[in-house]
Image (cartoon, rainbow, N blue to C red):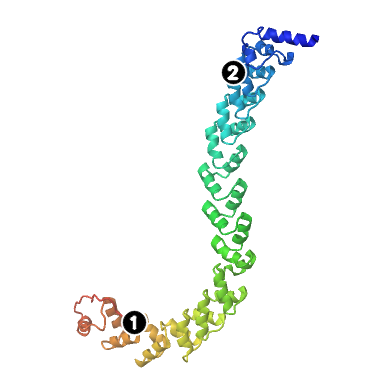
Amino acid sequence: MHVKTLLSLIIVLIISGCGGPPTPWQKAGFDGTESSQSSWERWERINVSPKDYKRWKAAGVNTPEEVSEWMSIGAVKPTHAYAWIKIGVTSPEEVLLWAKAGVRSAEHAKEWKDIGINTPEEVIQWSNIEINTSKEAGEWTKINVMTAEEVQDWKRLGLTINEIAQWKKAGVNSFKESRQWLKLKVTKPKLVKEWKFSGIETPEEAGEWINAHIPLAKIAAEWKYAGKLPHEAGEWADISQMRYPLMLEWQKLGLDTPKKASQWVNAGVTDPQDVIKWRDAKVSTPDEVKEWINAGLSDANNVASWKSSQLNTPQKAKKWLEAGVKTPQEIKEWKKIKVKTPKEIKEWTSIGVGYASEAQAWLKFSKSKKQIKQWIEEGYVPQDANAKSKAKKASSGESEKPLNLQSSQVK
């Protein structure tokens, strides 16, 4: 028999107890053929039992040297090391780094890792901004603020964590973007959501519309989906009250440029439908519109009656309008009672008599405007059945209470 083979057989017999029951180390997997480097004796030297040997191996610690390193940091049992290993901390050196960060147990390290903070270096960064517990840090990571640096950035805006959460829900994922919206005076997250929902995703694009005098997301979207750029829309914004459909109405009238439409707006006509009314009244230019408005008439329907009369210019109608006359027909009514000039009409309107029919009723009791003014101030009305007798009593100095009637005007 070969000498080497014979020696191996002798060693096996010695370990096996010359045919006796297997030792604990044999049960652990040692059969006596191991080299000195992997001998069970090396495990015994560091006080590892066969049972614990198997547990260390199951934990992924495969050599006595590695076990010694774990033991040197206080992980004297396989379960101690395994608690760290199963959360991804695979070396004693890394455990020491967690300890320097103030995390002295695998349980606490897991709490940090569960909220997305995975290294001791990150824990230290959070501690540097006075956030020392995973619970407090978790309030930030819950709203997707994942680094201490990002927390500091958000806090620079003077916002609370709840306010920051609302910005995050609105789709604003960074402090930088939030600051850009705030510079545009878009101060509420719900307004940001409106811009993003309308298809205008970035503060840069929103800023172009806002600077074009279109500060509302819904209205900006009208122009955008009509194929207009902000600067094109901006030229129409003030004229069309920012609305794209209103711009189309101006263009249908032949006022197809902002310059043409603005002439009407500057004259006081802000609604394209009113342009049609003025044109129907045979007032075709903004300058003439302005003259009629300056004369006292802003309603195109009323202007139509003046245009069809002899007083068909603002210059001719102005004195009558200043006297309180609204239509040429009223002039005819005044002339029937011999009131022929604007000055005479103004004398009546100044004492509270606005219509020719009312003046005619008063003239039945007195020709004196002074006396009529006194009666009006005392509450009398000419159409009252007893007005004549009461007026006579009043003129003779007898005491009479003013009439308590609803109106003193006859139309």
Does residue 179 lie above or below 296 as drawn? Answer: above
Quadrant of res 383: bottom left
Q: In this orientation, does residue 188 appear?
A: no
Q: CA distance from mark 1 to mark 2?
A: 111 Å
Secondary-structure class at tag 2: loop
Closer to us: 1 or 283? 1
Counting from the top left corner in percent of width and height, residue 133 is at: 54, 31
User: Could you tell me which residue is drawn at 21 percent across and 75 percent down?
Assistant: 401
Q: Which residue is mark 1?
A: 353
- Compared to residue 190, the image places residue 10 above or below, namely above
Residue wearing tag 2:
77
Q: From this viewpoint, which residue is outermost toward the right? A: 2
Looking at the picture, how far across and down is residue 110, in whole percent?
Answer: 57, 30
Q: Give 75 or 235, whichever is nearer the viewer.
A: 75
Nearest the eye: 205 or 261 = 205
Identity, as a three-letter code, of the amino acid under mark 2: Lys
Q: 327 left or right of 93? A: left
The N terminus appears in which quarter of the rendering?
top right
Q: Secondary structure at mark 1?
A: loop
Mark 1, mark 2: which one is toward the viewer? 2
Kind of residue sitting beneath label 1: Val
Q: Quadrant of the C terminus?
A: bottom left
